[in-house]
Each structure stands twice: as structure tokens, then as C-alpha cells.
Amino acid sequence: MSTQQHPAHIKESHNHDDDCAPGDLDHHLAIAKSICDAAGERFTPLRSHIFELIVNTQEPVKAYDLLDRLHPDYGSPRPPTIYRALEFLSKLGLIHRVEALNAYVVCDHVHENARAEFYICDSCNKVIERHISDHSVTPPAGFTVKRSIVEHYGICPDCAAA
């Protein structure tokens, strides 16, 4: 779970009742551009391309896999360039890092209070993202949570039916 904060107007226009379908590139790009604009950040062509690769992959993707998939128009970026772009996208809540897989997934929706949890299939590595309600994370008095990760492991419905 990440602690990215989205601007209030983004929360209103992109909520849990209007989740992006995986692979809905135009919708994801519109949201990403709005979030970057609201945060006063630049959604550079390289950041946009990396974000597009993650959206289009529709499964957890590792940084080095992204490096291999980069379009030649972006030159030959080194790993630090990819990691900086991933950090940028993650900081704005556009993607999440799935710690156990050391991979990244596109954020399916904006999280109130920036709380997400992941259900990871042990069989196919599919990652399902869900919103965590406010009552599930209550830190001790005076403790400020900067980053949390909630990952559950098991078998997804598709693999269970197989």
C-alpha cells in the first residue's frame, strides 16, 4: 500500500465507482495528465511512455522488463532513468509497487487516504487491487504512517476454476 495523495478534484472525478478498466489507456492517460497538472509536475514523453507500457502490460512488470520494451525513440535509457520515472509515477499514485514481486502495476483507481491492498495469485501472479477502508489501518497515537504495504497471497478465481 502506498501513501500517495491525489488532488481533491481528481478524487471527485475518478472514484471507486468509476474504476479504470485494465488496459483502458486513454482513460488512464487522461487521469495521469490531470494528476500531474494538479501537482505542478511534468508528464514528460518518457514518463508517459513508461506509464503506457505498464497500463498495456496488464500484469505486474519489472523495471528491467520495461527497459527492454522502451521504444527506440527514447534512446537507450539506463536503469536509473527507469527507476526515477517509476518513483515519479508511484509518488503521484499512478502506479503501485508490488513488493513481493518487485514489480509495478497501474493503479486501478484513486484511493481515499491513499490505501490499497493487493491480492496476488500464487499460480499466475495476477494482482487484484482493492481499496482499504479507513478502519483497517489505525496507527498508534502520534504515529504518522508514510508508507504501508498490504499484500495477500492465494489463488485467484480463474486459477481456482481451472
Image (cartoon, rainbow, N blue to C red):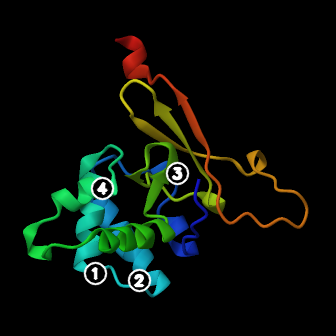
Disc 3 target residue? 16
**In this view, 85 is above or below 158:** below
Q: Residue 69 placed where, x, y %?
A: 17, 57
Q: Earlier in the sequence, mark 2 or mark 1?
A: 2
C-alpha distance separating marks 2 and 1: 11 Å
Q: Earlier in the sequence, mark 3 or mark 4?
A: 3
Q: Which mark is residue 134?
A: none
Q: Earlier in the sequence, mark 1 or mark 3?
A: 3
Disc 2 target residue? 37
**In this view, 43 is above or below 2:** below
User: Position of 132 compared to 157: left or right?
Assistant: right
User: Position of 6 compared to 146: left or right?
Assistant: left
Q: Residues within 10 Å of mark 2 (few under 14, many from 20)?
A: few
Give the residue type at disc 4: Ile
Give the residue type at disc 1: Thr
Q: Which mark is residue 54?
A: 4
Q: Earlier in the sequence, mark 2 or mark 4?
A: 2
Residue at 30%, 64% (x, y): give it.
51
Q: Residue 16 placed where, x, y %?
A: 52, 51
Q: Residues within 10 Å of mark 4 (few under 14, many from 20)?
A: many
C-alpha distance separating marks 1 and 3: 27 Å
Give the residue type at disc 2: Asp
Q: Residue 109 placed where, x, y %?
A: 47, 55
Mark 1 against mark 3, which lies toward the viewer?
A: 1
Disc 1 target residue? 44
